[in-house]
Amino acid sequence: MKTGLGEMPDRDGSSESGSEEEMEAREKGPRPDFRVVQTEYSSKLGKTLFKDVGAMWRGVSKSGNEFYTLKIGKLRLLVFHNEKFSEKISRQFNERSELNSNDKKE
């Protein structure tokens, strides 16, 4: 139901007012693997508080590479492990050889 001027929004929070970020926060989806926080000093309380500003989700590509999606406000970034290509190939080779040796033992 749409609300008109001066009317109270529905209790379920489906009012069309609000920022785009608030609308996205209401959407259902997988729970983030990490929260991104920013420190904020509260002079009323006299202490530092952590304010949620974003989240990060783990993903795996079709080729098996791990990455993360970082979202802060409207900014969406991909995060990759920082390793050289040669290190990555040798790590994958070692993982596969371990799997093959475990299969032969059974």
Image (spheres, rainbow, N blue to C red):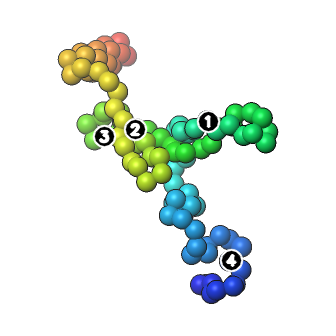
The picture quadrant where one finds residue 38 is top right
| Between discs 3 and 2, the one toward the N terminus | 3
Q: CA distance from mark 3 to mark 4?
A: 40 Å
Residue 27 visible in the current orientation: no
| Between discs 4 and 1, the one toward the N terminus | 4
Residue 61, numbered label: 3
Work out whether 42 lies above or below 14.
Answer: above
| Between discs 4 and 2, the one toward the N terminus | 4
Identify the residue at image location x=61%, y=75%.
15
In the picture of the structure, the residue carrying the numbered disc 4 is: 10
Question: Residue 88: percent from the left, percent from the top?
Answer: 26, 21
Identify the residue at image location x=29%, y=17%.
91
The residue type indicated by label 1 comes to Thr
Residue 61 visible in the current orientation: yes
| Between discs 3 and 1, the one toward the N terminus | 1
| Between discs 2 and 1, the one toward the N terminus | 1
In the image, which is nearer the foreground, mark 3 or mark 1? 1
The residue type indicated by label 2 comes to Tyr
In the image, which is nearer the foreground, mark 2 or mark 1? 1
The residue type indicated by label 3 comes to Ser
Residue 39, numbered label: 1
Helix, strand or loop at label 2? It is strand
In the image, which is nearer the foreground, mark 4 or mark 1? 1
The residue type indicated by label 4 comes to Asp
- The residue nearer to you, when weighing 103 against 41, is 41
